[in-house]
Image (cartoon, helix red, strand yellow):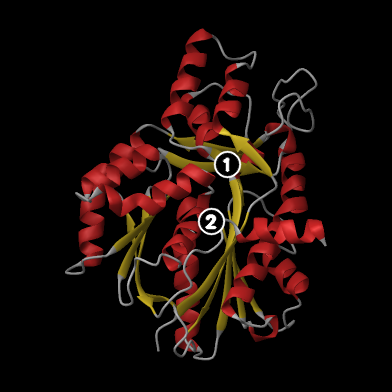
Amino acid sequence: MTARILSIGTATPPTTIRQEQIRDFFAAQPCADRLTQRLIRATFDAAQIDHRFTVIPELGEPGASGLFVDEHGVLRAPGTALRNAEYIRHAPDLSRRAAETALAEAGVAASDVTHVVTVSCTGCFAPGPDFRLVRDLGLSPSTERYHLGFIGCAAAFPALRAAERFCAARPDAVVLVVCTELCSLHVRPNTTPDQIVSSSVFGDGSAAAVITAAAGDRPGLDLDRFATTLTDDGESDMAWTIGDDGFEMILTAEVPRIIGREIRGAVDAFLGDAHPDAWAVHPGGRSILDRVESGLELDPSALAASRDVLRRYGNMSSATVMFILRELLHDPDLPTDASVAGLAFGPGLSVESALLTVRGARPANAPDDLDTAARALTATA
């Protein structure tokens, strides 16, 4: 039997960052000279992002101060321990909310979950996110737990691949996959091109999927096959290390060019004779989507879901492609048996690929953010 994604739930923090507001905030920093200000404005304006979400309230409220912004509006540089403490404070609740939505949409009881796979590269602690989900959701204490850390933006597909393997080994398995990233916690007062690009695209969010091979006739997305490819270069162009004042992202201008050169070979080797009806491509940034589109000679409409998620949420690292799959899961224009090709890019530079198939009549017109609706109901209760 083929493992199937029954549902995908999402959650975002309450603070919204408008792109023009955060652009002006960075341009006004004391470390930004006139040339840097021009680069900041050009980079932020070219990102094709309207807004993002963050667990840092002062980043979304002009004039506010806190751990990351002082009373003069100057960006602080808190140490890694302080940033990770904020991750520990916010990540478990965000994960729980996404997971609860996924379980409710799938009609699956928490007691039915047999495996939990958590994903994150923006913080760490032990007992970790997998342990907290078992406790916070009231899962069985015998639930198998696994955590994929520091794989970066590409990690959702390895997590789904692990879920598919668990379902193949145990036909009655119900796997909960949760990707939670708090990228904004690693913002820093730095005017290097890498940091400017990072500040212009990254946001926070969580996405959870319920996967089982015992789906029966329930609708969803079948997990058909996966592949991993390492490119010939890029090891020093996309990297992620832990520094004294947060995690340090290296994301050079070569990344889109490398993807543009390598994408055709990687995808052709994976797809073979398959001709996808839809695409779920991780939007590391607008330029990466542009390179994928041109490198694969795709119609501009093929990446509409990826560009829409980038516009509304930014790059949430591993969680982002799950948001895109949720869009496709609820797309009324995708017929049953439509094929979906997924691509995500991670440090190395690595390419993770997935091929999925739409099954059954899915509910259309899902709320823009199911977690937002849940918060509104809670507020009025």
The residue drawn where x is 51% and y is 89% is: 170
Inspect this view and state whether residue 138 appears.
Answer: yes
- Looking at the image, tell me whether mark 2 or mark 1 is earlier in sequence order: 1
265 vs 289, left or right, is left
Whether label 2 touches label 1, CB < 8 Å = no
Of the two numbered discs 2 and 1 in the rendering, the one whose residue sits closer to the viewer: 1
Q: Secondary structure at mark 2?
A: helix
Q: Secondary structure at mark 1?
A: strand
Relative vertical location of residue 86 with respect to residue 93 in this rendering, above or below: above
The residue drawn where x is 74% and y is 61% is: 377
Question: Residue 319 bears which disc, if any?
Answer: 2
Relative vertical location of residue 364 with respect to residue 82 in this rendering, above or below: below
Q: Nearer the viewer, residue 170 or 365?
A: 365
Inspect this view and state whether residue 315 appears.
Answer: no
Q: Could you tell me the amino acid type at mark 2?
A: Ala
Mark 1: few/some/many CA within 10 Å (<14, 14-19, 20+): many
Relative vertical location of residue 341 with respect to residue 151 in this rendering, above or below: below
Relative vertical location of residue 64 with respect to residue 275 in this rendering, above or below: above
Question: Residue 52 bears which disc, if any?
Answer: 1
Q: Quadrant of residue 126?
A: bottom right
Q: Quadrant of residue 54?
A: top right
Question: Residue 169 bears which disc, if any?
Answer: none
**Image mark count:** 2
Pinpoint residue 80: horizontal percent, then vertical percent: 71, 39
378 vs 306, left or right, is right
Pinpoint residue 13: horizontal percent, then vertical percent: 68, 49
Q: Could you tell me the amino acid type at mark 1?
A: Arg
Pinpoint residue 49: horizontal percent, then vertical percent: 48, 37
Check the picture and name the quadrant holding the C terminus. bottom right
Check the picture and name the quadrant holding the N terminus. bottom left
Q: Nearer the viewer, residue 205 or 352?
A: 205
